[in-house]
Image: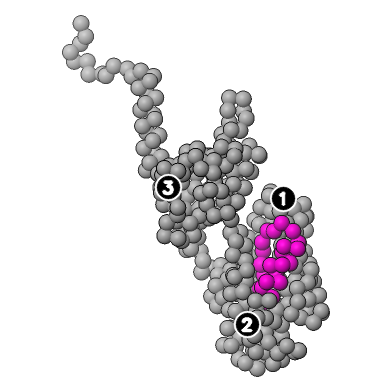
């Protein structure tokens, strides 16, 4: 007969252990304050935890089973899908910042690790993503990397991001563009109209940059004084030049008086473009020098121009 004092429970069966493990797994998914999801190799979401309800447009009934390009705005979806494809193709975990909109329409930044899921033969059949909201952490760093007057990022941040963006463009095999911008005859403007009015001109340039380069991944900087820079990926040099032309035309169209800037008598910009191919081996200083030379050519052409 069994000992009445024996209080040890009978051993659990393998099925019971599996059910217990599944309950723990489900509890973690339901309560984790991170985004956890999987996608198949066509970009269809095959699993998503409850925290996804924080995102704009989330619908629990249709989210799982839908394609990433059906769930997010195209520029967001392209960013997310590019990172999934990289993890699958390279069969490795990747760590990237990604941006998505919350229900309150605010854009949040997530640090995401994406890694491939392998079948018994070692072939990739899906990808898994863990994403942690780092928006507040990044905001805490804003003061040290933001120009107070224009709201653009400063030269310190430019130096931080340049190498990162060059590596990203190399991985994605995309053309990276450095655009340098200078206000024509800005010293003469300040001498005639005063520095407070000069500050308004700098803000107008920053506004024109923001209105043109507002895609995820586009970066705009005030390097110092009236010197600005943009760093962005594009599909071709012609596309980059068209974006630079939009910035130039936007400022010219504002018709800000500038008597010393002949012949037009209004504030204008000179812009210089340099293109960084995915296989480029040039240093940051060498690339910046090429941008400076292109900017000089724009000045030499008579200002109010874009030059390569």
Quarter occupied by residue 301: bottom right
**Residue name at image x 51 percent, y 64 percent:** 141
Task: Specify whether 65 is left or right of 295.
Answer: left
**Residue name at image x 72 percent, y 50 percent:** 173
Is any atom of residue 13 visible in this view? yes
Outermost residue, top side: 1
Label 1 or label 3, whichever comes before in sequence order: 3
- Tag 1 residue: 173
Quarter occupied by residue 292: bottom right
**Residue name at image x 70 percent, y 90 percent:** 265
Q: Secondary structure at mark 1?
A: loop
In the rendered image, the quadrant that contains the N terminus is top left
108 in the magenta segment = no
Distance from Cα at disc 1 to Cα at disc 2: 37 Å
Which label number is shown at residue 59?
3
Q: Secondary structure at mark 3?
A: loop
Contact? badges 3 and 2 (CB < 8 Å): no
- Magenta span covers which residues? 224-248
Distance from Cα at disc 1 to Cα at disc 3: 34 Å
Label 3 or label 2, whichever comes before in sequence order: 3
Label 3: how many residues lie within 10 Å, few (<14), some (14-19) or many (20+)?
few
- Image coords of residue 195 (percent x, y): 60, 88
- Tag 2 residue: 254
Distance from Cα at disc 3 to Cα at disc 2: 43 Å
247 in the magenta segment = yes
* 189 relative to 119, above or below: below
- Image coords of residue 174 (percent x, y): 71, 53
Label 1: how many residues lie within 10 Å, few (<14), some (14-19) or many (20+)?
some
């Amino acid at each position: 007969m069994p000992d009445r004092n024996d209080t040890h429970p009978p051993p659990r069966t393998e099925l019971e252990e599996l059910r217990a493990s599944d309950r723990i797994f489900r509890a973690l998914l339901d309560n984790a304050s991170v985004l956890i999801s999987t996608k198949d190799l066509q970009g269809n979401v095959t699993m998503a935890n409850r925290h996804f309800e924080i995102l704009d447009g989330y619908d629990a009934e249709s989210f799982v089973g839908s394609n990433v390009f059906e769930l997010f705005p195209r520029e967001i979806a392209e960013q997310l899908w590019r990172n999934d494809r990289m993890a699958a193709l390279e069969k490795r975990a990747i760590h990237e910042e990604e941006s998505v909109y919350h229900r309150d329409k605010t854009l949040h930044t997530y640090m995401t690790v994406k890694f491939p899921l392998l079948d018994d033969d070692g072939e990739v059949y899906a990808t898994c993503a863990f994403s942690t909201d780092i928006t507040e952490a990044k905001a805490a760093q804003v003061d040290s990397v933001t120009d107070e007057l224009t709201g653009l990022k400063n030269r310190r941040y430019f130096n931080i991001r340049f190498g990162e963006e060059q590596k990203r463009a190399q991985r994605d095999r995309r053309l990276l563009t450095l655009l340098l911008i200078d206000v024509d005859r800005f010293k003469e403007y300040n001498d005639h109209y005063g520095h407070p009015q000069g500050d308004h001109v700098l803000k107008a340039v920053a506004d024109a940059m923001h209105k043109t380069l507002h895609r995820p991944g586009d970066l705009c900087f005030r390097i110092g004084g009236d010197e600005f820079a943009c760093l962005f990926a594009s599909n071709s040099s012609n596309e980059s030049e068209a974006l630079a032309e939009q910035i130039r035309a936007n400022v010219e169209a504002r018709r800000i008086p500038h008597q010393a800037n002949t012949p037009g008598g209004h504030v204008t910009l000179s812009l210089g473009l340099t293109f960084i191919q995915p296989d480029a081996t040039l240093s940051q200083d060498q690339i910046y020098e090429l941008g400076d030379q292109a900017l000089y050519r724009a000045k030499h052409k008579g200002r109010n121009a874009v030059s390569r």
